[in-house]
Image (tube, coloured by chain):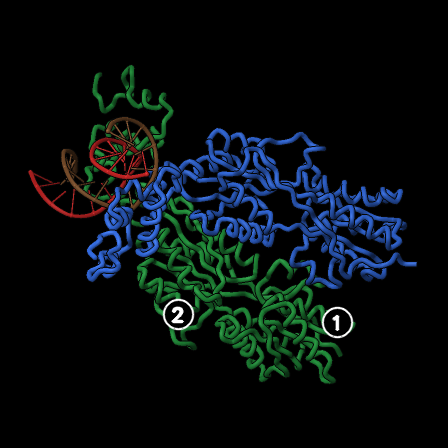
Chain colours: A blue, B green, C red, D brown
Amino acid sequence: MTDPIHGDRMNGDPVEDFLKRRKKATINDVASLAQVSKKTVSRVINKSPSVRGETRDLVNDIIARVGFRPDPQARGLAFRRSFLIGLIYDNPNAQYIVNMQMGALDGLRGSGNELVVHPCDWKAEGFLDEIRDFVELQRLAGVIILPPVAEDQGLLDLLDELDVPFIRVTARNNDVQPPIAGLQIVSRDRVGCEQAGEHIVGLGHRRIGFIAGNELYPSAHERRAGFEKGLANHGLTFATVESGNYSFDSGYEAAQKMLTRPDRPTAIIGCNDDMAAGAYKAAYELGLRIPDDLTILGFDDAPIATRINPTLTTVRLPTRDMARMASEKLTSAETKPGASFIFDSALIIRGSSGPVPK
Amino acid sequence: MTDPIHGDRMNGDPVEDFLKRRKKATINDVASLAQVSKKTVSRVINKSPSVRGETRDLVNDIIARVGFRPDPQARGLAFRRSFLIGLIYDNPNAQYIVNMQMGALDGLRGSGNELVVHPCDWKAEGFLDEIRDFVELQRLAGVIILPPVAEDQGLLDLLDELDVPFIRVTARNNDVQPPIAGLQIVSRDRVGCEQAGEHIVGLGHRRIGFIAGNELYPSAHERRAGFEKGLANHGLTFATVESGNYSFDSGYEAAQKMLTRPDRPTAIIGCNDDMAAGAYKAAYELGLRIPDDLTILGFDDAPIATRINPTLTTVRLPTRDMARMASEKLTSAETKPGASFIFDSALIIRGSSGPVPK
DNA sequence: CTGAAAGCGCTTACAG
DNA sequence: CTGAAAGCGCTTACAG
């Protein structure tokens, strides 16, 4: 037995000898141990079909035994692109961001890509230049964009120009707003909101107030449409609507206005949990008990939803799953250009919604 | 004027000609335009002192005009390390994580490094192997470790072995616990907690309950020591202590126990905001008003602190600044080995602390 | 199906 | 103070 290929059966096995040197294996080591050219090893790494099965198995065996993993920097240099996925966002919701990061990482696991986070100031001048520098210099393998930046057409055009694959996360409903081309993860905020609307009507509420979000954001538009649909299913409309901007303070102020009117609503829907929590504060200050005197609903199922008293009835989106899908589809060769992936929201009933006060 | 070096004064300026090709400049382009070797350009990039001032200025001028930025992958390949900083953590506090990321990015800006996030499961088996793979494969330029993983001696040993620079964020007080070597950002949780202890004693409270964190965590130990010091300054000790684990639920249960006793405390301190919020829930269910019937304090100044009613008196740490310092010191050549950088916490008085009930 | 040569864009080690 | 050669660890383009 002096077969150099099956050297493991010999004394002085070259693979064992190599391992004794305790050095990280390179493609050259694998090539020489397998007695093929480095190009062939490269083909195996990149799953080229034009490698004889026997050769492939031999090379893979050596790769496994020496623990070879191709250097992403060297590969990146030759490929003219890195193995880095950029995550671009300008969003104040910390739990949302962390969920998205976790999900994106879930989808990247085993792909050889890493996640580079890139919070930004969407409204700053020079925003696009800054993104251009980032994407070009890092030669990103792909970009995931979160709302609301994901609605910036200028950014999308830039990424197209830079020829970097990207995927957007959005609540945009292409039946309502002009569709945007390209890969996207679409949340149907409307679905759970309609359930929520039905829910409070079912509890007997008839005077229902709504704290709106900025309707330039698809999420705000879709959520409102969903809540309205839920009411409309029973012939109702909002008794009163105040504008908000998704912030706690704006929710507080909007609720104050509604609750200090003589015909105050018996239920208030916030377009997100933070504004709903602001409505809690207004109710607290006015001595209104939740849900006995006032029902409140939100959207997001943020951590705060289960930490305020009573716990908040809200609508949840599978954010982590959405992000996992985003990174999977972004990095998969099978993904069809322009594909959309849809996720539904769902109502979560907790303690803040109760029967209409007599 | 046919001076090739100051070609910009001629017709057919070579730099202008190059720019017309609209291709990203490489070190070779800069070298040929500056009529020096690429090695000299390399020296300028890397701020080698052994370059004649005149040559350096000329090269820098060309670099600026063609917008040359060295390719991090190529540089990384030659340097045998990347320009990536890893952020390793296993921490459920989303706002804390986001703050740390923002701060770390603040400190990295302009350094040419990017931030690769690496949440992990500290208690999973194979944790260290997974970190080893990550650090080795990416050839990280440095690692930032957040609590509580930052207390894992096995991890620190591994990073030492891998010879990657790292810096820890910790609440560990080296006067109390055995010191850990290496770069560290140290928060003095004790300081603000002592202020907080003084604060409630000053409000007249004498029966004070404490919801502890896991005292294996330096933060939990230090905070407790600080609160106790604040009381001790006035000859007081905790009337009752319940254990907790930093979770909302554990705070809720601990507070329930304290508040259902006949000699219930008039003030409860939670070792973090989440547990304090749990105490709110217990108080809410028992019909106790805050702060009229019960004073509550927390630690963190998490988002929830200003979203619950009344707003929570708490202690704040400059988390973002700490992280900025971490990445600055980690990547700076001037940083002395083993240096510590100290940050104090501070009391923030809000609506949840009031005079002791009569 | 496989390989030798050249190249990705930088730096190190060595000269001078 | 500056440069020509070799190399980092991969892949592309071309042959065969």
Q: Residue furthest front?
A: A1
* Label 2 – label 1 distance at C-alpha: 46 Å
- Kindly identify the residue that appears in the image at 69 percent across and 52 percent down: A316
Q: Residue furthest top?
A: B11
- Kindly identify the residue that appears in the image at 84 percent across and 48 percent down: A208
Residue A90 position within the rendered picture, expressed as x and y whole percent measured from the top left: 56, 44
Disc 1, SS: loop
Which of the 4 image quarters holds residue B154? bottom left
Q: Is residue B55 left or right of residue A189?
A: left
Q: Please give the residue where the numbered disc 1 appears in the rendered image.
A: B292
* Relative depth, front residue between B345 and A93: A93
Q: Quadrant of the N terminus of chain B?
A: top left
Residue type at mark 2 is Gln
Q: Chain of mark 2?
A: B
Q: Is residue B141 left or right of residue B307?
A: left
Looking at the rendered image, the disc whose residue lies closer to the viewer, 2 or 1, is 2
Residue B277 position within the rendered picture, expressed as x and y whole percent measured from the top left: 66, 66
- Kindly identify the residue that appears in the image at 32 percent across and 23 percent down: B18
Q: Residues within 10 Å of mark 1 (few under 14, many from 20)?
A: some
Which of the 4 image quarters holds residue A134? top left
Q: Is residue A82 above or below residue B216?
A: above
Q: Quadrant of the C terminus of chain B?
A: bottom right
Question: Mark 2 or mark 1, which has the lower sequence index?
Answer: 2
Which of the 4 image quarters holds residue A225? top right
- Kindly identify the residue that appears in the image at 39 percent across and 47 percent down: B113
Residue type at mark 1 is Asp
Q: Please give the residue where the numbered disc 2 appears in the rendered image.
A: B153
Q: Is residue B234 above or below residue B53?
A: below
Residue B220 position within the rendered picture, expressed as x and y whole percent measured from the top left: 53, 73
Disc 2, SS: helix
Residue B177 position within the rendered picture, expressed as x and y whole percent measured from the top left: 42, 76
